[in-house]
Image: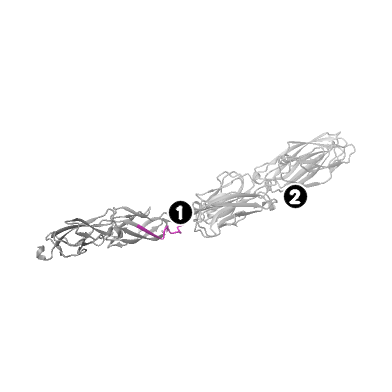
Amino acid sequence: IRYSIPEEMPVGSFVGNIVSDLGIEPKRLISGKARVFTAGSSDYIGLDKENGHLVVKNKIDREELCGEMSACSVGFDVIFENPMELYRVTVDIQDINDHSPVFPKSKIEQKISELAVLGARFPLESAIDPDVGVNTLQKYTLQPTDHFKLNVQNGDDGSKNVEMVLHSPLDREKKKHHNLILTAFDGGKPQRSATVQINIIVLDVNDNPPVFSQSSYKTSVVENAPKSTIVTTVSATDADESSHGIQYYFEHASSTMKALFSIDVDSGEVKVVGDIDYEKHKQFKIKVKATDHGGLTDSSEIIIDVIDVNDNTPKITIMSFSSAVAEDAAPGTVIAIINVQDLDSGDNSKTTCSIDLNSPFKIISSLTNYYNLVTDSELDREQTAEYNITITAVDGGNPPLSSKEILNLKISDVNDHAPQFEQEIYNAFIGENNPPSTTILTVKAVDMDWGPNAKVSYFLIGGDLNGAPLASYISINSESGVIYAEKSFDYEQLKAFKMQVKAQDGGSPPLSSNVTVNIAIQDQNDNAPQVLYPVQTGASVVAEIVPRAADVGYLVTKVVAVDVDSGQNAWLSYKLQKATDRALFEVGLQNGEIRTVRQVTDKDAVKQKLTVVVEDNGQPSRSAVVSINVAVADSFPEVL
């Protein structure tokens, strides 16, 4: 967009409405974080986000901003985010007639020989008016005009060179001094003017003025040239034999010219005395005057071209930067808008912008001096969580100058990884008769994502166990993955079972994975042996009969017992605890068989009572006792 305003407008003055001129919604100013960026050091135009008005931020002096250039403007960029957009705005600054012409001196003294020929020219210092166009210097008048008239010449650069021309002979004997008034007018409304008094001193003799060897001297100087560097030497000659000692002066040189260059009054040698900067001045035009002792003068011009040196490094400005980008960002996503400026000229000002190789980003050029940093390939936060991107700007000088800027970019997490258990299957053991809330084992899953996406919770996948809900037997801590027994297990009822555990992350939507957990119940020696035979009844006495003719090793009976435990807890051994006659009977340690160990005699009592202990192999062991009645007799009546 291009606007036009006059200079010197008060701060806050309206420039234009970018909302209507760009055709955007007013709320876009706030949501897009609209702002003004100026590449230079001064911000002249500001943005009112409430109504979209561009307003004057700092007072604009066209003469200070653009000097003698008639075309004057300020440029800036309006930047939006979400999404990133950039608009270039140019505001033309129109000149107003705020300066009057000014002569370098309030009084001019000019020595002129009485023998000066008609038509002799005498240069005068021009007035200076920093305005441009019609508001700058337009014309001169000279009063009185009885001996001199004005001659005004327009220079190629639009300047006006003024000189007096002698049109009536001077006679020192008649009048030694002539007082003239030179007036300069600009073309503004209202018109402004300035005057200078000219005092003419009429000299005797010396009828030949100095003459420069050249009508103009063209030379060049390198910027940053050391002080005392000789730029050029001007010279003039005088045909008068008695006239010598020509002196040289700058004519109506500005304060800037005098701060940068000097001229030796006797030799005409022009030297550097200040710091020459190509970026401020690309060419100088200096009027030079040669004067002899008789007051005759000649004028010439020195044109000095400044040669640019690559003395400015490129300046990198980050216009907009997203410090974090999602790992699933599509290739081509804009990360940053970068502005690169180089104050040099020609190849020295041409810049290229690049970033590190082997990164998933690239730099692409957009508008002049603008670059976009965009994603070039897919990102993976789990592989690289952040990048330090070095942006390098290099100019085209020889040798080239460069500058760097480092951007720290964090990759924000996307829930693209499910939790993974540390084992493919978990096996655990728990002893029976455990107290409730006993810890069985801990399952653990790891999620490679970050933050809430990596927070893992654990759940039991529902099911039944022995006709009851699994949750009545088992619980799991959702945060730690610790699995607890909710009740006491009985090996004799449940020896082993399996279940499924789910690990789920905190993403949206969540991701999960399952694992199988096998739990085996370990037997405890919690059951005593049970005697199945002989059957113990309290009602009657049952007796085993052993004939008196029984041989050694006669099988009297067999104690049969079982233990519902398992393993060594169910290994049974038999021992004879008590007996009427220990020397008559023995019990098989492993099989419980009761046999005679000697021949039965008549002396042996008919009634024999044995007590057998059945013991398991648990720690500690458990046992059962059985009593057996044995009758040593040959017939049942004898037993009775």
Q: Where is residue 128 in the image (x, y as percent from the top left)?
A: 71, 42
Q: Which of 283 and 477 is in front in this view?
A: 477
Q: Nearer the viewer, residue 228 or 411?
A: 411
The secondary element bearing badge 2 is classed as loop
Highlighted magenta segment, given as a residue range: 413-428
Question: Along the polypeptide, which appears first: circle 1 or circle 2?
Answer: 2
Tell me the crowding category of disc 1: few under 14, some 14 to 19, or many 20 or more residues within 10 angstroms, Cα based: some
Q: Where is residue 42 in the image (x, y as percent from the top left)?
A: 60, 45
Residue type at the position of mark 1 = Trp
Residue type at the position of mark 2 = Asp
Any magenta on residue 418? yes
Apparent side of residue 453 relative to residue 41 in the rendered image (left or right): left
Q: How many marks?
A: 2
Quarter of the figure with residue 64? top right
Q: Can residue 73 be seen in this view?
A: no
The secondary element bearing badge 1 is classed as loop
- For residue 156, the mark is 2
Residue 298, placed above or below residue 346: above
Quarter holding the N terminus?
bottom right
Q: Nearer the viewer, residue 374 or 71?
A: 374
Q: Where is residue 228 in the image (x, y as percent from the top left)?
A: 76, 40
Q: Which of marks 1 and 2 is in front?
A: 1
User: Which residue is label 1 attached to?
Assistant: 450
Any magenta on residue 52? no
Are the residues tagged 1 and 2 within 8 Å (C-beta)?
no
Q: Where is residue 410 in the image (x, y as percent from the top left)?
A: 51, 52
Q: Which residue lies furthest to the right in this view?
A: 241
Quarter holding the C terminus?
bottom left
